[in-house]
Image (tube, rainbow, N blue to C red):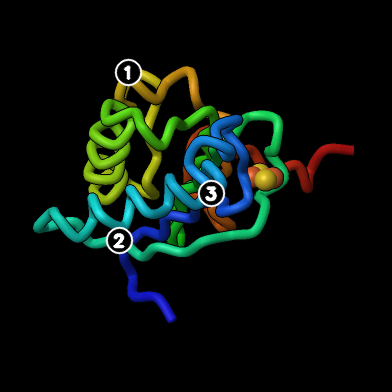
Amino acid sequence: MFDNSPVLSICLSCCDGREAVFGSRGGARLAQEVVAQVEGRTGTELNLRGVQCMSQCKRPCIISLSGDNLFTYVFGDLDPKNTGHFEALFELIARYETAPEGFLKRSERPKALRSNILGRLPPLGSASSIVTPLDHIS
Ligand code: FES
């Protein structure tokens, strides 16, 4: 289904409070905008998928960035109309693609997304120094 490029998942169900104005959910509008932005860029290798609720409903709109043997990041409070969020997102993806295991410290993530982070999960089998096996603790 996907190639080895990062996977950007977008919650299509998120509501941003402007559904009556636009006639569609914030998450769906965010996805439309991301698709349009990806199509308009060269050199962005990315797999896109929509998800019906990512269980972070109190912080809409929600996305995650993941990949094989890569850290998974979850971001919230994204605004489908905020061009700064999109610029930051593509900057983040470019850094993510080249970082070992996709690991990015807070200072390495674009400022516009720093307060939006909801989770950073290491891949299974991660060699990252932030992961400590607990199988020898009794
Ligand atoms: S509706 Fe988007 S996370 Fe639940």
Marked residue nearer the N-terminal end (3 or 2): 3
Ligand 1 is found in the corner quadrant, namely top right
Q: Looking at the rendering, which quadrant does residue 120 occupy?
A: top right
| Residue with the most extreme right position | 138
Residue shown at 79%/44% (left/top)? Answer: 136
Query: Which residue occupies the foreground of this view, 49 or 22?
Result: 22
Q: Is residue 62 above or below residue 81?
A: below
Three-letter code for the amino acid on which mark 1 is drawn:
Lys
Crowding around mark 2 (Cα neighbors within 10 Å: few <14, some 14 to 19, many 20+) is some
What quarter of the picture does the N terminus occupy? bottom left
Marked residue nearer the N-terminal end (3 or 1): 3
Disc 2 is placed on an element classified as: loop
Three-letter code for the amino acid on which mark 2 is drawn:
Leu
Circle 2 residue: 46
| Residue with the most extreme bottom position | 1
- Is residue 105 visible to us here? yes
Circle 1 residue: 111
Residue 78: horizontal and vertical position, in percent? 46, 32
Residue 39: horizontal and vertical position, in percent? 19, 60
Marked residue nearer the N-terminal end (1 or 2): 2
Mark closer to the observer (3, 1): 3
Residue shown at 9%/57% (left/top)? Answer: 42
- Is residue 119 visible to us here? no
Crowding around mark 3 (Cα neighbors within 10 Å: few <14, some 14 to 19, many 20+) is some
Spatial separation of the CA atoms under disc 3 and disc 2: 25 Å
Residue shown at 29%/45% (left/top)? Answer: 93
Residue 6: horizontal and vertical position, in percent? 36, 59
Circle 3 residue: 24
